[in-house]
Amino acid sequence: MSIPRSVLPFDGDALLYKDWCTPTESQQCFETLLKSVDWKNDEVVMFGKHMVMSRKTAWYGLQPFRYTYSQVERTALPFTSLLEDLRRKCEETTGCKFNSALLNLYHHGMEGMGKHSDDEDSIVPQSGIASLSFGSERAFVFLHKKTREKVKLSLPAGCLLLMKDRCQECWWHELPKTKSVGGARINITFRLMKT
């Protein structure tokens, strides 16, 4: 694993470990997660309307944590053996603690995620969030909340992006939609929830 690269110029830190796991390990993780995770269509409430999205999600934890985003509440399932292995490896790499994982399955490039921050009250403030990518490489964008400065990067399969310190407080991040990516991507964000 190479030395991580810092991607944010100020107000928080984000470290990119581009080759966190080998291409073979990455492909094995992708295939196992695709089959073993209890995927559900993501549900959101927008403008008072309940919508079912094509993107799929799953929520796991060391405890049955309740997690609410987009006005929909989820209860964490127990970690699978692979998720537990990945959680421990992320802790060893980053020195951060994690007790939960939100998973997203993007079937193709036209499924994405708009700008947001992972700053819900249920997450320990300024704790690290480890984001793993498997499958198709995708573009990723940080947008500063005050200056509107943009930082664009690419997230290849097998990479780890650690967002920490004031990152969630000062920056939004997004996964833009694109017609140029046809393959699927699985993203795991390990978090530290309040207990």
Image (cartoon, rainbow, N blue to C red):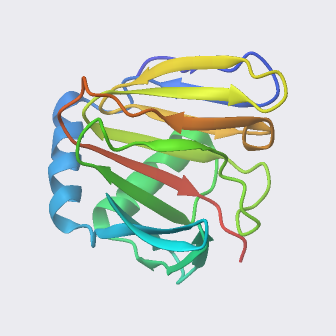
Count of picture labels:
0
Relative horizontal placement of residue 70, taking residue 175 as reference (left or right): right
Residue 63, quarter of the rendered image: bottom right
Q: Is residue 6 visible?
A: no
Residue 115, quarter of the rendered image: top right
Q: Is residue 98 visible?
A: yes
Residue nearest the observer in this picture, 188 or 26: 188
Relative horizontal placement of residue 34, taking residue 106 as reference (left or right): left
Q: Is residue 154 above or below residue 174?
A: above
Relative horizontal placement of residue 48, taking residue 10 as reference (left or right): left
Q: Quadrant of the C terminus?
A: bottom right
Identify the residue at image location x=54%, y=21%: 4
Residue nearest the observer in this picture, 189 or 24: 189
Q: Position of residue 139 (x, y in %)?
A: 42, 25
Residue nearest the observer in this picture, 81 or 66: 66
Identify the residue at image location x=33%, y=44%: 111
Identify the residue at image location x=39%, y=31%: 159
Identify the residue at image location x=49%, y=46%: 90
Residue 34, quarter of the rendered image: bottom left
Q: Quadrant of the N terminus?
A: top left
Q: Position of residue 172 (x, y in %)?
A: 67, 37
Q: Position of residue 183 (x, y in %)?
A: 18, 36
